[in-house]
Amino acid sequence: MSTAEKYLKPEVIRQIKRLDLRAQFIVKGFLHGLHASPFHGFSVEFSEHRKYTPGDDPKDIDWLVYAKTDKYYVKKFEAETNITGYLVMDLSRSMGYTYRQELTKFEYSICLAAALCYLMIHQQDPVGLLTFDRKIRHSLRPKTRRGHLGDVLSLLANLKPAGETDIAHSLTQVSAMLRHASLVMVFSDLLAEPGPILDAIYRLRHGGHDVILFHVLDEAEVRFPFEGMVELQDPEGGQRLALDADGFRGTYLGEIERFREMYRRECSQAGVDYVPLDTSMRFDRALGEYLMRRSERG
């Protein structure tokens, strides 16, 4: 079913809601950390007042306003701004692969993106969408209204990952497009030469952006469940390779582990969040665990 409803099925909504209820304080802390200014909490000019809402710091309540109006208002500092998020989605043909899971890598990424979009909009943070293969293909401007999640899903649900990819070039385009420091959330299987991709990620990071790299692989790409003689096909180039799966498994698993470890190490040194995932992981649990680790580290 190529409609947004596919990604708004009751069980998907339940997972997003469950994540929201379980990890709301983590998400709030995560986003607050991105908003934080070194001047926040000091003597700074504030731009306006807004009504106090649960979760605001009581220290920010303006008691003079309360004395006059009998209502709670907090000072909104000039430094306190919304963080703008961009969901950056890989449309390459390899993202359409699954061996035995219900969701392809692309569909799994849509579920993750939907959860993040929902959570950010819930915090009144605008979220935009960019998709790419060899270059940027589609874009939605960042918005905070609740209906924007439906717009994001409607676009993604009608896309088919089918093209060849140039991840490095596309991320360089993203870097050139963004005028203000943003939260850039990249969803890709990263099945391309890593050097240029890492250079493009460094460029994003050095541009002042907070970058989260969701490395989404199929469960079979991580575990190599094949047995006996098998014929494997490159999902983008189309080349076929016949091999003895049992004899090749150890070599393959060692290579995929080194591949992920290299990204983890390089991203860590660059101050980029690297989140390795596979399609057998429940996306709400995977996202909740990532946010928990982030909050503990922060």
Image (cartoon, rainbow, N blue to C red):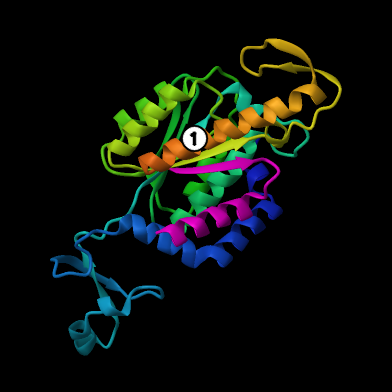
Residue 144 placement (x, y as % from top left): 40, 52
Crowding near the residue tagged with mark 1, few <14, some 14–19, many ≥20 C-alpha atoms within 10 Å: many
Q: Position of residue 121 (x, y in %)?
A: 44, 55
Quarter of the view holding residue 257: top right
**Can residue 6 be seen?**
yes
Residue 223: x %, y % from top left: 72, 35
Could you tell me which residue is drawn at 50 percent across and 22 percent down?
133
Q: Residue at x 56, y 35 (%)?
A: 260
- For disc 1, the marked residue is 263
Q: Quadrant of the C terminus?
A: bottom left
| x 67%, y 42%: residue | 6
Pick the front one: 177 or 1: 177
The amino acid type, in three-letter code, at marker 1 is: Tyr
- Magenta residues span 273-298
Quarter occupied by residue 102: top right
Q: How many marks?
A: 1
Left/right placement of residue 116 relative to residue 182 reads right
Location of residue 122 in the rendering, given as x and y in whole percent from the top left corner? 46, 59
- Is 297 in the magenta? yes
Of 119 and 219, nearer the camera is 219
Q: Residue furthest top?
A: 239
- Label 1 element class: helix
Q: Residue at x 40, y 73 (%)?
A: 55
Side (left or right) of 143 relative to 61: right
The one of 154 and 255 positioned closer to us in this rendering: 255
